[in-house]
Image (cartoon, rainbow, N blue to C red):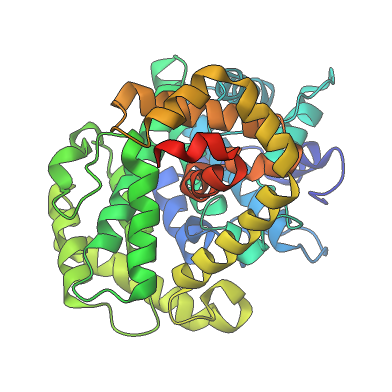
Amino acid sequence: MNPSTSGWIDKFLRDLDEHYLDNLSLDELYLDLRKIGFIYGTSIDIVLPNTSDIRYSEEEKTKINLFAALAVTYYETIEDGNQQDCIKALIQFYEYLNNKKSFFSFINVLTSNNNEKLEKIMHTRIQTNESLLKKNFSHLLTNALLFIDVLAFEHFLIHDKNPIEYASALEETLTNIVFLALNSKLEKDTYDELLVKLFASSVRYTKVNSTEQASFDQIHLERYTDELEKRYILDLTSLAVWNDREVDFGEQAFVRTLGVELELHNQLVKESLNSVQFFVKEHKEDISFFNYSNPAHHFYKQTTRTVSILILRNKKRLIKEISESKELMILLGQSTVRDLSKEEKNQVKQQLLDICKTIPSLAIFILPGGGLLLPILVKFIPKLLPSAFNENN
């Protein structure tokens, strides 16, 4: 079974025992997914028994792990489920998200075979586009958010409704909490300040106040009642505050407070922090992302440099697209002399993302977490537009 060739889902399901998937629990599987790094945005192994002699690449392992988690979710949720219905449910789930122009971006798959259609959807879903962003650092924006798919799929199966609202809300919650976590450090160096500003700019379109006074009260954690949702939020926060030195008191206090807000036992909080530390200690040499004292710092530098190059290379096309959007130009101009309302900021964000969709080289803005890159784009807009635009600055 080779996840890089057509027909791998058929072979994957055929190689497994008929009742293997429906006997697994997603709660138990989550711990295994965390152990192999899937929850942290990388996969050092696959979560199910390997019946093949093929040595899988990291991308292939991630693809297998994502499909396994989605399949286990289906069989645990749907009584008397079957493979064909599972594939159809997954296709419907992803088409819902794609049709609503969510943070998932997929190619238009034209094939009559459902299994092949799902294979192409999943291939696109985990792509990190190595030619645009260094793969080791794009994980922070893409693969670390893959488990959103699993939780959103479970929500879709249980409530039988479009999952886009749930998936978007969860991504927003995770982004906002990471911002608060970064802002909780007692002593911030230059890159800590840059990261806080980056996240603050990214979440200005949400209900979180991008100031030091922002708090959990502004994030609706009460909507998350399932322990798996809570543990995932906690684990990504633990990943966000990780560094190769001791986590400072402010960050520890933040993670403990988050555990209280999520109504999780303190033992689970300790386990979450220890799990990140243990995983990195065991696999640091094999994963370049962790070969820095604080990989988020390096991520910021690498991402800013890469996005800057992409923007400058597409300068003419970008200027033309922005200039032709009269409403966007008006709002951008007004933003130099007054604060935009929440609705206006959402409008600017959406129109900028729509423009990025028309320029293939800027597709990274539409990836999961791509909203974090918007402030970098906004920073370049005054330099790109005609001098008349800057008269109000």
Q: Residue at x 63, y 45 (%)?
A: 364
Please provide percent x and percent y for residue 272. 31, 65
Side of 356 relative to 282 (left or right): right
Q: Is residue 117 visible?
A: yes
Please provide percent x and percent y for residue 117. 77, 27
Please provide percent x and percent y for residue 75. 52, 32
Q: Nearer the viewer, residue 386 or 85?
A: 386
Side of 128 relative to 266 (left or right): right
Q: Nearer the viewer, residue 19 or 236?
A: 236
Side of 83 relative to 280 (left or right): right
Q: Is residue 244 above or below residue 370?
A: below
Quadrant location of residue 94?
A: top right
Residue located farthest toward the top when viewing the structure as drawn: 161
Q: Nearer the viewer, residue 328 or 84?
A: 328
Q: Total label count?
A: 0
Q: Nearer the viewer, residue 225 or 183?
A: 183
Please provide percent x and percent y for residue 296. 45, 67
Q: Is residue 313 above or below residue 49?
A: above
